[in-house]
Amino acid sequence: MRLRDLEDKELINLQDGRRIGYFGDADLVFNGETGEIVGLEVNGKGKFFQLFSEKRVSLVPWRAIKKIGKEVVILDAGAETDIDTFRDL
C-alpha cells in the first residue's frame, strides 16, 4: 500500500468511536535521526467553522494504528496519547 492510498481514509479512535480527522489532512512526524515515522499530527479543527474555531492538534503515535480498512484507519488512541491537547500554531 502506498501512502497516497491512505489519503482519503478517515481516522477513527477505537476507544470512543470519535472521528479524529482524515489521514490526508495529517502531517507525518519523523524521527530526525532514524528517519522512522513516529506519529501523525492531525489538525482537528472543524471545516465549517475554520475561521472562528481554535486549532486543535492531535498527536497520535504511529504504533496506535491498529487496522487499515477500505474507508477508515482504526487508532487505539488511549491514555498514552495526547489526543485531546490544544496548541497554538
Image (cartoon, grey):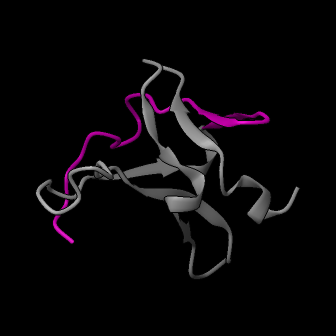
Give the left or right position of residue 45, taking residue 19 as reference. left
Q: Position of residue 89 (x, y in %)?
A: 21, 72
Q: Using the rendered view, name the quadrant where residue 84 is placed.
A: top left
Q: Is residue 37 visible?
A: yes
Q: Using the rendered view, name the quadrant where residue 78 is placed.
A: top left
Q: Position of residue 73 (x, y in %)?
A: 65, 38
Q: Is residue 26 visible?
A: no
| Residue in view at x 66 percent, y 35 percent | 72
| Residue in view at x 16 percent, y 66 percent | 88
Question: Residue farthest to the front?
Answer: 48
6 over 31 or under it: above or below: above
| Residue in view at x 34 percent, y 49 percent | 44
Question: Residue farthest to the top?
Answer: 16
Magenta stretch prevailing secondary structure: loop
Question: Residue farthest to the left?
Answer: 52
> Which residues lie in the magenta part?
65-89
Q: Position of residue 11 (x, y in %)?
A: 55, 40
Q: Position of residue 41 (x, y in %)?
A: 44, 59
Which quarter of the image is occupied by the N terminus?
bottom right
Give the left or right position of residue 43, taking residue 64 as reference. left
Give the left or right position of residue 36, taking residue 70 as reference. left
| Residue in view at x 58 percent, y 41 percent | 10
Q: Is residue 18 magenta?
A: no
Q: Is residue 77 magenta?
A: yes
46 over 50 or under it: above or below: above
The total number of labels drawn is 0
Given residues 46 and 79, the one toward you in this image is 46
Question: Residue farthest to the bottom?
Answer: 33
